[in-house]
Amino acid sequence: MFDHLAWADAQIGRALAGTPSPAAAVREYAHVVGAEEVWLARIEGRAPELAVWPELDAVAAVAEGARVVSGFTAVLAGTDAGALGRTVTYTNSAKREFSTALGDILVHVALHGQYHRGKVNLLLRENGLEPVPADFIAFVRGAPAATQRDAATAQMSR
């Protein structure tokens, strides 16, 4: 799941940094990176270096995203199946304390990013730009899934 997270974050980030992008899409992507950093900091027992909704441009968000992915890579390299049940205690942005199993946090981080990457793609589409293939099947296939345009072309050729 984290190999996909790293790939999908990079796909979206490169697309946003490589072209003029809607501010809302960049803000959504920066949130993915910020939230990942906040969760990484909680796991590591330190103060986060980014806010949950950081004010970053696309280039800075890509750089921060690469740093955060490296952090998760290190955490995962030192984590075995038994450690996934380890409880992480943290205070959320509303100042409420929680204790959650490491494995549940990792699943949340992977799913949370995918939700927001979908929102980035919606914002791109609404602004006349091509969405970025970032779903899991594109990752494992090494090729994007069919698009609406592909389906329309196939329908017209019948």
Image (cartoon, grey):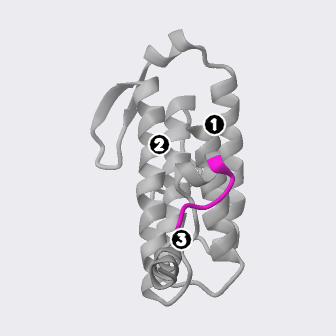
Which three-letter amino acid code belongs to the residue tagged 3? Glu
Q: Which residues are magenta?
A: 141-146
Q: Which mark is residue 127?
A: none
Left or right: 92 in relation to 120: left
Q: Quadrant of residue 50?
A: bottom right
Along the polypeptide, which appears first: circle 2 or circle 1?
1
Please tell me whether mark 1 sits on a helix, a strand or a loop.
helix
Left or right: 39 in relation to 63: left
Q: Position of residue 4 (x, y in %)?
A: 60, 45
Spatial CA span between label 3 and label 1: 22 Å
Q: Which residue is mark 1?
A: 72
Q: Position of residue 109 (x, y in %)?
A: 47, 42
Q: Which residue is mark 3?
A: 55
* Vertical relation: 143 (above or below) 111: below
Placement of the N terminus among the 4 image quadrants: top right
Left or right: 139 in relation to 109: right
* Vertical relation: 143 (above or below) 106: below
Along the polypeptide, which appears first: circle 2 or circle 3?
3
Graded by Cα atoms within 10 Å as few (under 14), some (14 to 19) or many (20 or more), the crowding at tag 1 reads many
* Circle nearer the viewer, 3 or 1: 1
* Vertical relation: 58 (above or below) 114: below
Q: Which residue is mark 2?
A: 109
Please tell me whether mark 3 sits on a helix, a strand or a loop.
loop
